Amino acid sequence: MPDDDFFIRRFARERDRGDMDKALEIWREASVRKFDLVAGLIRGFRFPGGQPLQPADREDAQTECMTRVLDMGENFRGNTGAEFRAAIKRAVWFGCMDVGREVLAYEKHIGGSLDERYEESDGGMFDAAVERYLGDREQLATDLAEGAEEMEQMLELFDWAIDQVGNDNYRVVLQLTFRNKLTGEQIADQLGITVQNVYKRRERGLTKVEEILRAHRP
């Protein structure tokens, strides 16, 4: 199976020649192959305080992080697989932080205050936290509602597009990947094919999904 250096060298060669269409095609192929790495990094992610991303948030994080990885090709200036993997790790870290920003914001407002409010006669940190929360809760609620609705619509549309993929082999791999949350190895075992074949079907299936979504765009 070709390694990361193989893909990134090809990507860099086309990029440096000025053929960004070809370079980004290679980048997409390389990025899709790292789906399992992204999923593993998300599972192992820890916020600065040590807490992990909640399991319920991992699907959103997977979408956010893979989008970031796919978008990095436009500005990636590296030439090696090591630089590619480092960029993926940064993208996953920032993606998880972004997905978890609502939780972090909430914890920042109330952190420690429930104990201290009984120890400080003037209310101290608890009152200050409540005032800050009350001051921006309306805007926060609006932002969260809009973001959640947009994410839900995007996921529903993506899920719908998977079922529209005409090739049975591609569609099944996409369903097992995004609905069953199986790794490449698990899919290969279940279907009796190689992991490399799983990656190829997934990559081609995603291309079909992209075509379907573009055609469906109002």
Image (cartoon, rainbow, N blue to C red):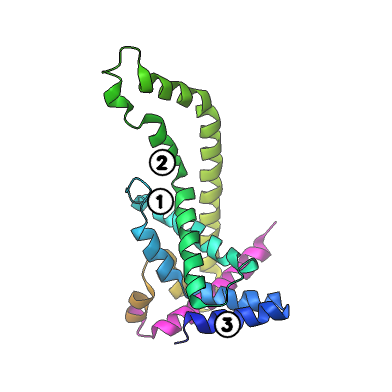
Residue lying at 47% horizontally and 75% vertically, measured from the top left: 33
Residue identified by numbered label 1 = 57
Circles 1 and 2, Cβ within 8 Å, touching? The answer is yes
Q: Along the line of sight, which residue is nearer the eye, 96 or 15?
A: 15
- In the image, what residue type sits under mark 2? Val
Residue lying at 30% horizontally and 20% vertically, measured from the top left: 117
- In the image, what residue type sits under mark 1? Asp
Task: List x then y, in percent, for residue 15.
Answer: 67, 77
118, above or below 170, in the image? above
- Dot 3: few (<14), some (14–19), or many (≥20) neighbours within 10 Å? some
Quarter holding the N terminus is bottom left
Q: Tell me which secondary structure the magenta stretch mostly adopts.
A: helix
Residue identified by numbered label 2 = 103
| Residue range corresponding to the magenta coloring | 190-218
Q: Which mark is residue 9?
A: 3
Say which label, 3 or 1, has the lower sequence index.
3
Instruction: Using the numbered discs, state the Cα–Cα distance from disc 3 to disc 1 in whole angstroms.
Output: 34 Å
Reply yes or no: does residue 208 show up in magenta. yes
Say which label, 1 or 2, has the lower sequence index.
1
Say which label, 2 or 3, has the lower sequence index.
3
Q: Which mark is residue 214?
A: none
Give left or right: position of 186 versus 16: left
Circles 2 and 3, Cβ within 8 Å, touching? The answer is no
- Quick one: SS at disc 1? helix
Task: List x then y, in percent, for residue 59.
Answer: 42, 56
